[in-house]
Structures are given as structure tokens and as C-alpha cells.
Image (tube, rainbow, N blue to C red):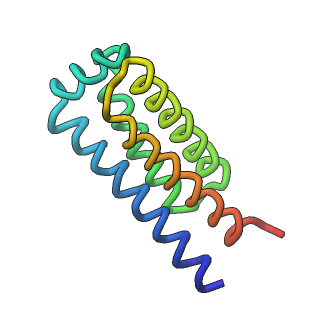
Amino acid sequence: MKTNKILYWLFTGLLCAMMLFQTFFSFAQTETLAEMYEDLGFSGALVIPLGIAKFLAVLAILTKRSPLLKKLAYYGLGIDFVLALYAHLSTGDPNWPGPVVAIVLLTGSMYFDKKLYSSK
């Protein structure tokens, strides 16, 4: 049980830190990130809404106030990460390991969340 909690917080802490960094980057370097999005085939207008969504996902995951919101946050981040990986690979962008790390952290966080906090 203790090992599961440690692993949960390791995966979840790293995932949330990554998402908070991306949120900060969305607001601090909007123009730069918009160019990166456009290079990957997305609209630069997605920078701010995705930054807000990632921040809200972190809140939903860490507060655990609503199981439904937490589940939606996990699934929303999963869709974001899979689309990011696809975009990097399809455009030949060399930054594809970032989304892979995010998918691994998300998967670990979800797995241990379910193991620790799901009702039996």
C-alpha cells in the first residue's frame, strides 16, 4: 500500500508539474507556442484554451472533489497527449519524446489512482 501511494504521487506529481509548466509557458510565451502549434498543423489560437484546460485538469486531479471531473481530466489529457504525439510524428518533428513521457506519466497516475482510490 505504501509503495502504491509513493508511485501514485511520483507519477501524479511529475504529470501535474509538467502540465503546470505548460500552462505557465502558454501564458508567458504565447507567440512562440502559437508558432510551434502552427508548425505542427494546429491553430495558434489553441494555446490559451489548452493552457487553461491543462490547469483545470491539474486542479481536478489533485483536489479529487469530483470523481467525474477527475476522470474527465485524465481522459482529456490523454486525448491531448495522443494528438500531440501524432502531430510530432506526422510532421517529422524531433520533439516526439515529450508526449511519450506525458503518456507514461498519465498512465501511471491513472493506474495507481484507480488502485488506491477506486471504491471497491
Q: Residue at x 48, y 37 (%)?
A: 81
Outermost residue on the bottom side: it is: 2
**Image spot of residue 28 (x, y percent):** 15, 38
Q: Residue at x 38, y 32 (%)?
A: 50
In which image quadrant can residue 92 be found? top left
Question: How far across and how far down the image is residue 15, in percent?
Answer: 43, 55
The quadrant of the rendering that contains the C terminus is: bottom right
Q: Is residue 87 above or below residue 56?
A: above
Q: How many marks?
A: 0
Q: Is residue 99 left or right of residue 111?
A: left
Residue 62 rendering spot, x and y as whole percentages: 49, 61
Task: Name the image quarter holding the N terminus.
Answer: bottom right
* Residue 17 higher or lower than 69, as above or below: below
> In the shown orientation, is residue 93 left or right of residue 82?
left
Q: Is residue 70 left or right of residue 55?
A: right
Q: Residue at x 22, y 40 (%)?
A: 25
Image position of 103 with respect to 16: above or below: above
Q: Which quarter of the picture shows residue 75?
A: top right
Residue situated in front as seen by the camera: 83 or 67? 83
